[in-house]
Image: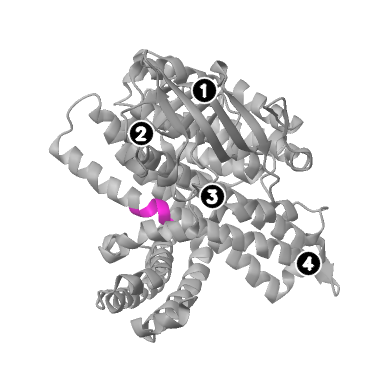
Amino acid sequence: MANFYTDNSDLKHHLNHPMMSKIVELKERNFSDAEKYDYAPQDFEDAMDSYDKVLEIVGEICGDIVAENAEDVDHQGPRVENGRVIYADGTVKNLDACRKAGLMGMAMPRRFGGLNFPITPYIMAADIVSRADAGYENLWGLQDCAETLYEFGDEDQKQRYLPRVCAGETMSMDLTEPDAGSDLQAVMLKASQLEDGSWVLNGVKRFITNGDSDIHLVLARSEEGTKDGRGLSMFIYDKRNGGVTVRRIENKLGIKGSPTCELVFKNAKAELCGSRRLGLIKYVMALMNGARLGIAAQSVGISEAAYREAEAYARDRKQFGKAIINFPAVQEILSVMKAKLDASRSLLYATARYVDMYKVYEDIARERTLTPEERTEMKYYSKLADAFTPLGKGLSSEYCNQNAYDCIQIHGGSGFMKDYACERIYRDARITSIYEGTTQLQVVAAIRHVTTGTYLNVIREFEAADCAPALLPLKNKLMALTETYAKAVETVTEYKNTEYVDFNARRMVEMAGNIIMGYLLLDDATRNESFTRSANVYVRLAEAEVARHAQFIANFNPDMLADYKID
């Protein structure tokens, strides 16, 4: 009997971060729900115990059911019959198990049937699910679309839809079209308002994850004659009303259990969510930020699976009379894999905590006026969440791909065969740095936090924090890296050349990420010495990466951009 939560002590370490005390107190409104619901926590310890017990259930289902079904789901995959998606047999079993365990709508308030979990333990569940089967996470994890419905839908919409999500109905976000991928301003699916005030949708959506879901959030053009984002609105489509058929399921490289659909809308009845014209400007941005945090969790879960598969094989595989884990070259690969895993997980949960803090203040603001101190704190954490979300999604997905690559390398020729899980893990990993915004787009979102000093200010805050005396040499290394980073940013920005900044953006973002993750691991190691080894390995890696980027920047000027232009 495997349990993917209890077999990983790193998860409890992150769940018990000191910031959780305030997050839980705010989320639970000083535990006022205890008077209304017998399952609501009465105090902080009770809440943490509840998270722990639910995550243990998640871990058990993932270890015993989802992971066991993963290979069969990958081979069978979903199919289309009469315009509807038929899930693989294993996917049906996975969904049934999660529904019966009450693991849908985890972050929704109790009045809608949810568990009222903060984002952090919910994201931890996503991390665990992704380790078991990254494709299934794409179905289960889309419950976070309910957050957008909760934030922007009216009370009637919340009452009608959110209890259904909490009861186990699935969701999707229908954004992409054949001619509108990353450039969502080009969306042309038409929303027409009828004489009675109702809406119908017509057009095609493509690359829609779980596209035959029960409840859809659809980006559509509601304003006649517009061609940009100001003419787009968000709509809720209920599958019960009909009008949408699945034309095809994409034949993908990986995450095969997750149906990626092309949808045809023909006079599909829908209802406006929020206000007109704010579909892309406001609501999709909220959707995407949640989705990017989810992909960061998926990336970490895949990294965990890759590392475990590689380590287990290295212990078992013998060459020249001894297990290959005893060879220095293999030890280095595994140590770096573990350091990247630990670094990306630390960044994931730091981001989740920042999101928790500003989201809970936003929610409180719907109930009462925030105090000036609360509003200041909400703005502070909102800025951090905005800065860390693209950093976390971008770097975690890149590390996920690198770990999946190294997992196969450890397996050698066997890793190229379908006899081992690493082949599926490798295929599943590849999409993480592409969907919900490629790594290049995450850099575009992150670079302003380089040029405005957000990352440097955060690093200085980390620098001012105490660390274990034995870790001071490590801290000194990070302080030196910070000065190298600050000088590199100054070198790039002093030219006041936008094209030059954009060209070097990924280098500067990665440098900031390397240092931030180094400091997060330093804090982990201060609170829990089991992270010391990964902290040492990662900071050495960061030293090499920061030096490499800094050297390139120091020897590169705007005149050299011409060498990279493709005629």
Mark found first going from the N terminus, 3 or 4: 4
Mark 1–mark 2 contact, CB under 8 Å? no
Residue at left 34%, top 54%?
387
What whole-number distance in Å separates the C-alpha atoms at marks 3 and 1? 26 Å
Q: Circle 1 sits on which residue?
A: 268
Mark found first going from the N terminus, 3 or 1: 1
Q: Circle 3 sits on which residue?
A: 435
Type of the residue with mark 1 = Ala
Front of the two marks 3 and 4: 3
Q: Position of residue 563 (x, y in %)?
A: 46, 83
Residue at left 36%, top 24%?
153
Quadrant into which the N terminus falls:
top right
Q: Circle 2 sits on which residue?
A: 224
Q: Position of residue 514 (x, y in %)?
A: 43, 66
**Relative depth, front residue between 139 and 113:** 139
Front of the two marks 3 and 2: 2
Display coloring: one colour
Residue at left 71%, top 33%?
65
* Vertical order, 3 against 380 (above or below): above
Mark found first going from the N terminus, 1 or 4: 1
Q: Residues within 10 Å of mark 1 (few under 14, many from 20)?
A: many
Kindly identify which numbered label has been placed on residue 412: 4
Q: Residue pushed farthest bottom?
A: 555
Mark 1–mark 4 contact, CB under 8 Å? no
Q: Position of residue 389 (x, y in %)?
A: 40, 51
Q: Which residues are magenta?
A: 387-391
Does residue 2 appear left or right of residue 16 in this picture? right
Task: Kindly state the secondary structure of the residue where label 4 is placed.
Answer: helix
